[in-house]
Amino acid sequence: MLLSANFLCQILVYNLGTGLSLPVIAGALLGVMLPLGVIFPAQGFSAARDLRLGPVAAPVLAVSVLTALASLAPNSLLGTLSLSLHPPDPQWISFTRDNQDHTLPGILLTVAAGVVFAPIAEEIVFRGLVQRLASRTWGPAPAVVISALLFGLVHGQPWFLFGLIGVGLVLGFIFETTRSLRACIVAHAVHNGVSLALEFNGGYDYTDPPPLTPGDWIWAGGSLIVLIGLGWILRTMTARSPE
């Protein structure tokens, strides 16, 4: 229901000629946050308890963010593999370029949409609701995979699918390990912020992505080792802390 409301709000706002960022913000606010803000109090739910949005220890939050950052290189490699198997639709490229706003207000809206509103809405839906409920039925590991697959598929961009699923797996692991949606939101926001900064700086051309080099594989492999190590540290830290 929330995904449908989010999508509907995005379509309606986009049809007003607002570009791509405002629909994302509207979808997050009107399609996810507002309904939950009305439904939860009416049903006696607590965001802190039922969505795990309560406080999180600073060391756990820091390692969660580092874990998300360590996943950038491996997920970028997965995204490049997706591009090579399923090149982006030329209409999507044209659509994206036609709706990009490189003015300062446009950049600020893009950052707000990608770094603030999208992480909050997506983490509420995919980790706070989908993964938490799936875990009750099938257990933690299948729930992480299910939420990651849905996270990748719902974006509707098969040329980025492997990378999106990779991001979903990392965030799902953080949620299952820390039992904190707040940690996921912050990690997701930092991940998106760095990704946007790299994209703004590099001007990546999706029509002709550069071939993978041995250095890319080495960098991704080294990052994966760091990612596994941070995951182990995170599990160790949270195992010593009460839920």
Image (cartoon, rainbow, N blue to C red):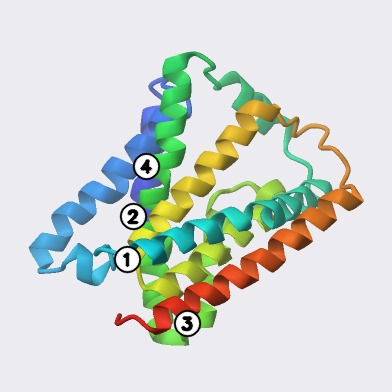
Query: Residue beneath label 3, please?
Result: 140
* Cα distance between the residues tagged 2 and 3: 22 Å
User: Does 220 sit left or right of 67 as displayed?
Assistant: right
x and y, in percent, of residue 72 in the image: 64, 52
Q: Which of 225 and 30 is in front in this view?
A: 225
Query: Residue beneath label 4, please?
Result: 117
Q: Amino acid under label 1?
A: Ala
Quadrant in the rendering for residue 241? bottom left
**Badge 2 or badge 4: first in the primary sequence:** 2
x and y, in percent, of residue 242 in the image: 30, 82
Query: Residue beneath label 2, please?
Result: 2
* Cα distance between the residues tagged 2 and 4: 14 Å
Query: Residue beneath label 1, please?
Result: 57
Q: In which quadrant is the N terminus drawn?
A: bottom left
- Mark 1: which secondary structure? loop
x and y, in percent, of residue 170 in the image: 56, 64
Q: Amino acid under label 4?
A: Phe
**Badge 2 or badge 1: first in the primary sequence:** 2
User: Does 80 sit left or right of 6 as displayed?
Assistant: right
Q: Amino acid under label 2?
A: Leu
Q: For the residues carrying marks 2 and 3, which lies nearer the camera in this image? A: 3
* Cα distance between the residues tagged 2 and 1: 29 Å
Q: Amino acid under label 3?
A: Pro
The reply to whether dot 2 and dot 3 touch (C-beta < 8 Å) is no
